[in-house]
């Protein structure tokens, strides 16, 4: 007999949609299915036809609109009703009408569920499983059986749980998937139960874990270690209550840690991109710190980490980010030292070394400024200006000088509030004076600044402010508290941010606005002008 291939089964479109806030259109579901197929999953569970009209429609459209390359589509549903004929059970008929190669049946394996939820006998439950599986197999379907509440049922009545597995397999189910439906099991229990079930029945087993103890991934791996060769999960761990086993984490662990080709190794390099794409399609992004695919999964902030990573990235990383399509980044902050500055500067294209005076001075200034409330980890443009200032010996030539600025907010007699700002700048000794109105002080200042500068510096025209955030730093000081302002911009296809801190919120905003225009005006051309950059020491 040919050796069975490992089965990676995705249930994002069924169990994933049982998560609060997850509402997918048929269009969304089709798009997610295409992405999962391209990633290389073996099975995609599309939903419950007959129960959910949207899922019935999904399977109808899938027939003509999904051209799956590696995955087979699975329709999910329940065993027939107690005491009913399987051939006329409307729900079973809907499963067949979905016309998928695979049908996955949820079946009770816990005696209390049989008696209290199904309100039938243990014997009739076995008959429901047997007849439904046989009916579907006879109709040419590959059948998987999800044995619901298997681990809790096994603890209560091991013999009955094993009987459910045998009944399903004898009727023709290809795999019996042991479900930790309430998600309350721990890895040692899962390993023991899967091991015993496999040894006692010899039947091909799968695993479906929920994350209510935070152990869904660990439980899944424990089941695989015990012999399960079919694994279910969802993108980003979406799912009912605390969610399911995270398919990305499980897959990366299987491929990279266990050497199991759950997906081809080269497809794993698309995992981070797939995670982002599915987050956008569903409107529910994955956790930034999610293993392997999270935006911060390979981001380093601590100075000691950066110092070791400079020598060898493996010293503070368990695997190489490129294997899962992610990337390493270093953050600059007061938790870092010279090595963090070197790594960040190099990533920005400045060939500096941690041993140089310029880097040491930059590191010291970052600590000093962060102690005043600055935060450079998100304000990459302000950091770059600071770095360049130090590389230029502490006095970076700026394209213009600021003489003064003012903002006035007037409440007019009719009740309207008018905000006006004016700026006095100087370029090559020539004064530039402009004023602007806005819907608030920052907007008015921004307009005045651009009115003064844009005619002289056309490159500022494409500078787009996309986000403005203000954070009160010492809230206990009440209205006298200092403020940190972070402004995000888009310019020339790049996104970056600047930061300003001051006891006056408008002055903090002005600093951030000013950094932005300087960053654009000093541009990369400026980098060359400022050469030579600190030589390697
Ligand atoms: C563990 C899991 O996550 S399994 C997946 C669960 N997913 C869903 O429930 C989403 C889709 N569900 C639905 O759309 C609806 O609940 C339906 C269409 C299935 C049923 O709707 P209704 O007929 O209105 O029944 P309701 O939701 O109130 O109750 C569920 C019924 O299914 C029965 N049932 C529960 N588990 C099973 C099972 N494994 N096999 C067969 N019937 C079951 C219950 O006994 C109850 O039957 P009853 O109406 O005779 O009392
Ligand atoms: C089948 C399923 O989703 C569960 O038992 O959790």
Image (cartoon, rainbow, N blue to C red):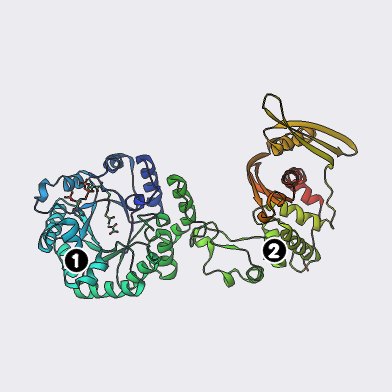
Q: Which residue is mark 1?
A: 165
User: Which dot marks residue 253?
Assistant: none
Residue 163 point in image, percent of width and height = 15, 68
The quarter of the picture where the N terminus appears is bottom left
- Which is more toward the observer, 40 or 389? 389
**Residue at position x 71%, y 62% from top?**
341
Q: What is the quadrant of residue 162 in the picture?
A: bottom left
Q: Residues within 10 Å of mark 1 (few under 14, many from 20)?
A: many
Residue 188 placement, left or right of 115: right
In the image, what residue occupies the spot 29% across and 61% down? Answer: 181
The residue closer to the viewer here, 135 or 283, is: 283
In space, the residues marked 2 and 1 are separated at their CA atoms by: 57 Å
Q: Name the residue carrying label 2.
A: 334
| Residue 302 can be seen in this image | yes
Q: Residue at x 40, y 63 (%)?
A: 250
**Callout 2 environment at 10 Å: few (<14), some (14 to 19), or many (20+)?**
many
Q: Which badge, 2 or 1, comes first in the chain's sequence? A: 1
Q: In this rendering, does residue 350 appear at all?
A: no
Q: Give the SS element for disc 1.
A: helix
Is disc 2 in contact with disc 1, using a CB cutoff of under 8 Å? no
Query: In front: mark 2 or mark 1?
Result: 2
Instruction: Judge whether 502 appears above or below 125 on screen.
Output: above
């Amino acid at each position: 007999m040919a050796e069975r291939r490992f089965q990676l089964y995705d249930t994002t479109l069924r169990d994933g949609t049982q998560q609060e806030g997850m509402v997918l259109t048929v269009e969304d579901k089709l798009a997610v299915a295409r992405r999962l197929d391209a990633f290389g999953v073996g099975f995609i569970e599309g939903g419950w036809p007959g129960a959910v009209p949207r899922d019935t429609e999904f399977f109808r459209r899938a027939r003509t609109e999904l051209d799956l390359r590696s995955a087979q589509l699975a329709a999910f549903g329940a065993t027939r009703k107690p005491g009913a004929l399987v051939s006329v059970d409307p729900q079973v008929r809907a499963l067949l009408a979905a016309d998928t190669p695979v049908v996955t049946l949820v079946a009770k394996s816990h005696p209390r569920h049989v008696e209290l939820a199904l309100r039938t006998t243990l014997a009739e439950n076995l008959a429901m499983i047997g007849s439904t599986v046989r009916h579907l197999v006879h109709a040419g379907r590959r059948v998987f059986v999800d044995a619901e509440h298997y681990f809790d049922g096994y603890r209560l009545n091991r013999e009955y749980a094993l009987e459910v597995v045998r009944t399903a397999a004898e009727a023709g189910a290809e795999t019996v998937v042991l479900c930790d439906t309430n998600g309350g099991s721990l890895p040692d229990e899962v390993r023991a139960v899967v091991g015993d079930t496999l040894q006692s029945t010899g039947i091909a087993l799968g695993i479906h874990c929920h994350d209510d103890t935070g152990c869904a991934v660990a439980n899944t791996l424990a089941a695989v270690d015990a012999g399960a060769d079919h694994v279910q999960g969802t993108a980003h761990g979406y799912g009912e209550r605390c969610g399911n086993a995270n398919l990305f984490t499980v897959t990366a662990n299987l491929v990279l840690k266990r050497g199991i080709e759950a997906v081809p190794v080269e497809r794993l390099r698309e995992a981070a991109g797939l995670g982002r794409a599915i987050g956008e399609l569903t409107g529910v992004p994955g956790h930034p710190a999610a293993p392997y695919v999270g935006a911060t999964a390979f981001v380093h902030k601590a100075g000691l980490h950066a110092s070791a990573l400079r020598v060898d990235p493996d010293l503070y990383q368990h695997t190489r980010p490129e294997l899962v399509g992610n990337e390493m980044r270093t953050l600059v902050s007061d938790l870092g030292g010279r090595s963090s500055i070197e790594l960040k500067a190099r990533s920005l294209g400045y060939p500096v070394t941690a041993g140089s005076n310029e880097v040491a001075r930059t590191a010291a200034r970052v600590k000093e400024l962060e102690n005043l409330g600055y935060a450079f980890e998100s304000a990459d443009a302000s950091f770059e200006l600071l770095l360049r200032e130090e590389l230029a010996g502490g006095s970076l030539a700026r394209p213009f000088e600021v003489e003064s600025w003012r903002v006035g907010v007037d409440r007019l007699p009719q009740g309207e509030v008018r905000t006006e700002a004016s700026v006095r700048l100087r370029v090559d000794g020539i004064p530039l004076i402009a004023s602007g109105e806005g819907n608030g002080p920052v907007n008015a200042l921004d307009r005045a600044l651009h009115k003064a500068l844009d005619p002289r510096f056309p490159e500022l025209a494409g500078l787009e402010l996309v986000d403005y955030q203000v954070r009160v730093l010492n809230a206990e000081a009440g209205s006298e508290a200092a403020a940190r302002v972070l402004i995000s911009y888009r310019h020339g296809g790049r996104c970056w941010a600047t930061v300003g801190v001051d006891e006056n919120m408008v002055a903090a905003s002005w600093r951030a606005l000013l950094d932005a225009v300087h960053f654009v005006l000093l541009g990369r051309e400026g980098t060359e002008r400022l050469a030579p950059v600190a030589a390697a020491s």
